[in-house]
Amino acid sequence: MGVLYDYFSASSDEEAGAVIDRVGGPSSQEVLVSPPKEARRGWFRRPPVPQPELIVDPGLHVFDTVTTKGIDPVVQLGTLEELLTGRPYGENVDDPRNGCVVANRSQGELLVLTLTESLVAALAGASNEQLAEVAVPWSQTEEFWGQGDPGVLTDFLCDLAGLARGARQQGHHLYCWVCV
């Protein structure tokens, strides 16, 4: 299976964290609703356990997302940030917005994490040519086992940069919804 990562922008940590319970992530309007629990009637006459129901809530905002299966927001984007900005990896890791958990469910199987503002600024300010250039050394890092595909990574970076540009224009931050 694998880990799913949906990168998206939101106006605040609270708004971003509210997507944690969406089935399918921030681009979905589907949520599980648990029915109220009935009182137990005794050992032998227990009612069946009520099952959650999947509903579509048309009132939920659908976020623009960049979806990937193999690029995590902390280690791999920390390496990317170092390549894009020259900021040492250790400083990236120490940044309070680097992978800060804003929502957590199911013992970490669902998470919403923050991305650093310096990475967002670097992505927003980079041209597609610069992103293609940085994709080559990034593809060769140990996190990709030295075998990342620069073309695939360039496409991902261009999409993520577009999301970052939109976020900066609106005064938003970037986040990552993680589903293990």
Image (cartoon, rainbow, N blue to C red):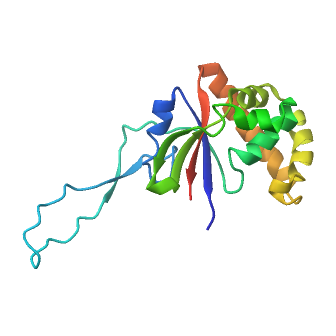
Query: Is residue 96 shown above or below 26?
Result: above
In which image quadrant can residue 32 be found?
bottom left
Taking the image as drawn, is residue 136 in sight? yes
The quarter of the displayed image where residue 93 is located? top right
Q: Nearer the viewer, residue 25 or 83?
A: 83
Q: Position of residue 82 (x, y in %)?
A: 83, 36
**Residue that appears at 65% across and 20% down:** 169
x%, y% of residue 44?
10, 79
Q: Is residue 109 left or right of residue 80?
A: left
User: 23 above or below 43?
Assistant: above
Q: Where's residue 71, x and y in %?
A: 72, 51
How far across and how far down the image is residue 25, in percent?
51, 48
Q: Quadrant of residue 1?
A: bottom right
Q: How many marks?
A: 0
| Residue found at the far left of this picture | 41
Q: In the rendered image of this protein, does residue 171 appear above or below residue 156?
A: above
Q: Quadrant of the C terminus?
A: bottom right
In this rendering, position of residue 8 left or right of residue 21: right
Front one among 125 and 144: 144
Q: Is residue 79 left or right of residue 58?
A: right
Can the viewer see residue 128? no
Tell which of 32 and 180 is nearer to you.
180
- Tell me which residue sits at (74%, 25%) in the image: 121
- Establish if 141 lies above or below 126: below
Q: Residue at x 23, y 64 (%)?
A: 50
| Left or right: 42 as drawn, with respect to 142 | left
Identify which residue is drawn at 72% across, 40% down: 159
Q: Residue extending furthest bottom?
A: 44
